[in-house]
Image (tube, rainbow, N blue to C red):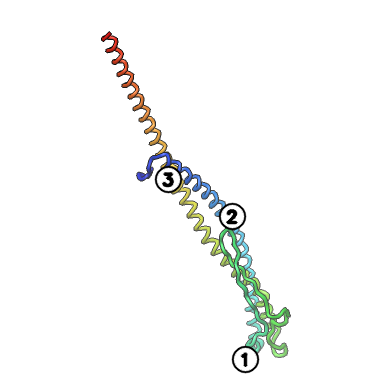
Amino acid sequence: MANTQVNPTRMELTRLKKKLSTAMRGHKLLKDKRDELMRQFLDMVRLNKALREKVEAGINAANKNFLLARAATDAQVLDVALMAPKQEVFLEASDRNVMSVEIPVFEYKTRTADLNDIYSYGFAFTSADLDDAVLSLSEVLPDMLKLAEIEKSCQLMASEIEKTRRRVNALEHVMIPELQTNIKYITMKLDENERSTQIRLMKVKDMMLEQAHHYSDRAAQSD
């Protein structure tokens, strides 16, 4: 149903047609954005699943090695060995733009490049299982950081997809149909007014012809 507040004039018709054209272009762009976001989102979900499985497997392996190390080593010795870590990790967080979504990017670096610095203890009084546990955690750390980055990116992209979907639906099911209905209403009103004007002009013409005919008849009778 047409909006009763619409003013049925040619100026309003021109304005609504321009608005409809803009809305349809915006609708196409938003649909393209939604589709591309969905494609990238699904790629990230698949990567997220693979990373989560890898990280969980690495953590499980590290936990098993820690349990074996605790069973083979005195608890006090184990606590002292892990009390003062030798290596340090520095995390830098930035972001990048993906289809108007600012997703995080995590980069890390260690204080030293020596891989042996992950061991903060001597090897004389500790078991090899502890070495394996520390190594497992060191190897899984990059994947853990990447997993955190991907999971946050998935959350942000899912939110943007939902916003874009609502905008597409609003344009497709509300704004564009309303504009089309109003344009049709104004067009019909203008056509109706034009027909009414033509009818009035024809009546005036007939009246003028009739009046002129009567005048000519009276002029002939007077002669």
Q: Amino acid at mark 3?
A: Glu
Question: Which one is nearer the viewer's eye here, 121 or 186?
Answer: 186
Answer with left or right where residue 56 lies relative to residue 172. right
Question: Which one is nearer the viewer's eye here, 143 or 173?
Answer: 173
Q: Quadrant of residue 77?
A: bottom right
Which residue is tagged 2? 36
In this rendering, does residue 52 appear at all?
no
Question: Which dot marks residue 180?
Answer: none
Answer with left or right where residue 125 lies relative to residue 30. right
Query: In percent of the image, x 69 and y 79: which residue is there?
Result: 135
Query: In percent of the image, x 35 and y 22: which residue is there?
Result: 205
| Figure check: 12 above or below 43 | above
- Which badge, 2 or 1, comes first in the chain's sequence? 2
Sort mark 3 into few (<14), some (14-19) or many (20+) by Cα contacts within 10 Å.
some
> From the viewer's perspective, is the residue at label 2 or at label 1 nearer?
2
Image coordinates of residue 197 in percent, x first then y, are 36, 30
> From the viewer's perspective, is the residue at label 1 or at label 3 nearer?
3
Which residue is tagged 3? 178
Question: Which dot marks residue 76?
Answer: 1
Image coordinates of residue 5 in percent, x first then y, are 36, 45
Q: Amino acid at mark 1?
A: Gln
